[in-house]
Amino acid sequence: MAREPGIEVDVVVVGTGAAGLCAALEAADAGADVLLVESESMPGGSTNLSGGIIMAADTSVQRRCGLTDSAEALYRDYSNLNQGAIEPGIVRHLAENSGPAVEWLQELGVRFLDHLVYAAEESVPRSHVPTRGGAGIVKVLLRAIKERGVDIALGKRVTDLVVEDNTVCGIRAGDETVRAGAVVLAAGGFGANPALWTKHLPSLAAAGSAAWYIGAEGSRGDALRLGAQVGADVVGHDRCLALLTPGFYRNLEVYFPGWLVLVDRSGQRRVDESTSYASMEMAHRRHGPFFAIFDAAAKKAAQPGLPLQYKQAVPGMEAATNSNWVEPLLDEMIALGKVAQAPTLEQLANAVSIDADGLVATVRRYNGYAGAGADPEFGKEARFLHPLDQPPFYAVELRRGILALTSTGLRIDASAAVLDSHGDRVPGLFAAGECTGGVLGSVYVGSGNSMANCVVFGRTAGTSAYAFATAT
Ligand SMILES: Cc1cc2nc3c(=O)[nH]c(=O)nc-3n(C[C@H](O)[C@H](O)[C@H](O)COP(=O)(O)OP(=O)(O)OC[C@H]3O[C@@H](n4cnc5c(N)ncnc54)[C@H](O)[C@@H]3O)c2cc1C
């Protein structure tokens, strides 16, 4: 490490993703002597791999696009979608500081497109798309960190917290020690450590090898282990963002093309197939498993290179997506038996063990909606409504498989202080980002939810940690 053992800094920040970099910057700007410690040889964690989209309300970007929004509206949407699963004080802090977070990032040099996208079904789009993805945000934050002379120790995995008089006062990385007035844990999630899925994500662990993680290698759940050393509470059991997939191969496709028809085991539709992944996840939790059904005409129309039939085009995402739903790949999967094929709907239903009468009735109604150009059951847009009447018919089961992030983690309060199992603060310990629980709720609200958490609570953690360090 750049520091000699025993040397003291005001604030040590563990992890160099969005949460850690924001914490370090705010602490440094408040006047702290800061050390950033990163286990990997490269900074950036999962943030570096991400789209960097940030959910925020009442921003200059929204105003430039002629949109009127408010922190209050975000607070209400977020609380409603999470059905009371998050403490109001946490939601209020997230909502009120999301707009200022976007302004702060812009002042540092992050650029956002004049094209906002919807996270879920909110009344005003508030997911801000950066021009250069998460890697661009990391680059800007790292530049600002370097300008402030903050040291970054790469390749140093923090193994322990130093604790004296029940107060966290430093970290150890192997046999090296750094003493600090306060410590911020921003060590990311635990997606890369499937051993922890069994305990913290049992519903995904049940998927076995059908589920895979798309984030950074450093997401090993170290914050859970470090927090346990000081009795930190862990909240948000079994919460994560696990996207549905046919599992053809390990790609990342977050939306379904609107022309698919999804049914449950009873053969009934339960959701607008083109909806956001938050709504899809909720519907699947209630009614899953889901089966994607299509016919020969839909398969033939799904040619590579054509615009993907998603409800919303996220700038940059379409080009990056390797879709599962293109004819050559579907033909390959049919030949491998991964997609069932049958000359009639009844035979198709029997092949994948769904109710044949239910499926036939659903498709009869659906074809009527296609003829009328309106879906009175789920409100899917008319452009996606095509009759399923060209045999053969096809079906494939969708499973929760793509683990994008975990949201079971250390409990914090609105000042980003880590809490113990009695709800009391652990003196000297703060946390932010994916390693925390209780900020992301029972459902992932949609694009930008996690980055909003990282930037808002990362900034707060940096400020709070320095205030604690100077007060003590
Ligand atoms: C492909 C992809 C796309 C995504 N797109 C979006 C998006 O557009 N919008 C959005 O909101 N979310 C998105 N997410 C999720 C989001 O990017 C992450 O949840 C977020 O970036 C996590 O940031 P973080 O700072 O908490 O953790 P990370 O960015 O993962 O950083 C944590 C850092 O801590 C380090 N670390 C871990 N343990 C230790 C230790 N013991 N000692 C020292 N260092 C340690 C890690 O190596 C890592 O560098 C996406 C995720 C993926 C994988």
Image: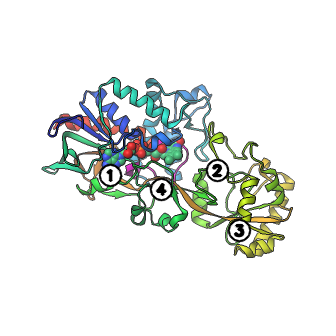
**Picture quarter with the C terminus:** top left
Q: Position of residue 398 (x, y in %)?
A: 63, 62
Q: Where is residue 4, by image quadrant?
A: top left
Q: Main secondary structure of the magenta part?
A: loop
Q: Nearer the viewer, mark 3 or mark 4?
A: 3
Measure the alpha-carbon separation of dots 2 and 1: 31 Å
Q: Earlier in the sequence, mark 4 or mark 1?
A: 1
Q: Earlier in the sequence, mark 2 or mark 4?
A: 4
Q: Earlier in the sequence, mark 2 or mark 1?
A: 1
Q: Nearer the viewer, mark 4 or mark 1?
A: 1
Q: Amino acid at mark 1?
A: Ala
**Pointers 1 and 3 in contact (C-beta within 8 Å):** no
Q: Is residue 3 above or below residue 276?
A: above
Mark number displayed over residue 255: 2
Dot 1: what SS? helix
Q: Earlier in the sequence, mark 3 or mark 4?
A: 4
The residue stretch that appears in magenta = 434-451
**Pointers 2 and 4 in contact (C-beta within 8 Å):** no
* Residue lying furthest left: 165
Q: Amino acid at mark 3?
A: Gly
Residue 77 placement, left or right of 391: left
Would you call the spot at circle 4 few (<14 residues within 10 Å), some (14-19), or many (20 or more)?
A: many
Q: Nearer the viewer, residue 319 or 76?
A: 319
Residue 396 placement, left or right of 426: right
Q: Which residue is mark 3?
A: 337
